[in-house]
Amino acid sequence: MSGGNFVLLCRELQIIELMGFLKYFVSLVLSCTALAVMGHNDTVRVSMITCHAGSDIYELCGHSALRIQAGGDDIAVNYGMFDFDAPNFVYRFVKGETDYMVGAYPFERFLRSYLRDGRRVVEQELNLTQQQSRRMLRLVEENLLPENRVYRYNYVKDNCATRPVAIIERAIGDTITFPVSETGGVGLSSFRDEMRRFHKNYPWYQFGIDLCLGNGIDYVITAREKGFAPETLEQLLCCATIPDSAGVTVPLVKRTSIINEGKPGGVVDGPTPWYITPMAVAWLLLAVIVAVSVYDIRRRGIFRVADTLLFGIEGLAGCLLTFLIFVSVHEATSPNWLYLWLNPLCFIPAVVVWTKKHVRLLMSCHFANFVALFLLLILLGCGVQSGNPAFIPLILASAIRSITCLYNIRCSVKTKA
């Protein structure tokens, strides 16, 4: 075993649980040593492992890994590992500079947590020649080198599912052909549509995604691109094909087996009660804003607290979007047309409403806000960007406050005149 591989093993131990440390250290050394020598004399089997959705938000699309077996050795190759203790991890994660790592360790160890959680685990043995399987081994060994094992994670284009597909294609020296038919629904879909399928029981999580990600995830994607989600990739692989040595098209998957059936119905949380969904909260807020605005019109005043809270929250959301659009390198955070609605300029009406010296500035802000919201509704309606349904009542609430303030200020000016 080379010194580089030993360093690799030591770093691997930093991101795995500490229970059974010594026992696991021995098994890890033996397993990764086996990875370096396996395949030279033994028959090598390579499989794609798909672990179905878990209950945490980062588990909703499932997880993919490679399984390599030769002789008595059984190794999992996991492209979904990260070091939470890395310097400035949280800031870099928010900014989009999220570095993931590939790790190789005993398959039994990999499988343990999924069995404990009751998640469904499916194995798809790949229809590779021994030459292609051994080439996979060499490519994986190359990936595991300290200088190669870290990569810049991208949620939809470079993740635990897309990486194994890429390495399979390098091993076979050709491209995997995925089925043209749509997977997971009828009609064309985008990255955002696919996310919504997996997040349907987590509406607040999807609300956050729809808020933070712009129209860069709203274009129609191919069947291959849908494979960014491990569970969808599993379905695609069932019908995927590759050319054999004679150029004849053959199935990529030789056989499929269920390692763990999982709990009936899966382990994803049940639907969020309707009365605490983003839509319910948004319509309730709109009702409150309408009531406040009617009260304001009748007394020809301005409910300053309501405006400060509403536009203050919009300003805070605008600060988040400002960071994501202009600083972050996350996929598709820019352009985000919601910036017409949520931006730091919203702080101006939230503050100026308490002064009497800046009436013109207040009127200008509300007029600009109303025009911007009108344009945004047109863009959303035309499909330029797909918005969360809960955005509509929230946008209407902001527009109603701007109209109310403009009307009352104008009436007040006429009365004084």
Image (spheres, rainbow, N blue to C red):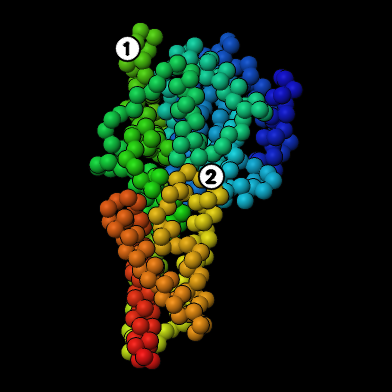
Label ID, residue 248: 1
* Quarter of the image with the C terminus in it: bottom left
Q: Position of residue 142 (x, y in %)?
A: 60, 22
Label 2 is placed on what type of residue?
A: Val
Q: Position of residue 58 (x, y in %)?
A: 50, 48
Q: Quadrant of the N terminus?
A: top right
Identify the residue at image location x=37%, y=12%: 244
**Foreground pick, 202 / 26:** 202
The label number, if any, that marks residue 329 in the structure image: 2
Closer to the camera in the image, 18 or 179: 179
Relative to 252, does residue 365 appear above or below in the rendering?
A: below
The residue located at (31%, 37%) in the rendering is 183
Asked where in the image residue 398 lies, by quadrant, the reply is bottom left
Disc 1, SS = loop
Give coordinates of residue 18: x percent, y percent: 70, 43
Residue visible at 39% across and 67% down in the picture: 368
One can see residue 182 in this view: yes
Could you classify mark 1 by the number of other residues whose Cα lies within 10 Å: few (under 14), some (14-19), or many (20 or more)? few
Can residue 408 be seen from the camera position used here?
no
Determine crowd level at label 2: few under 14, some 14-19, many 20+ residues with C-alpha closer than 10 A. Answer: some
> Where's residue 314, x and y in %?
47, 67
Q: Nearer the viewer, residue 410 or 265?
A: 410
Image position of 351 (left or right of 142): left
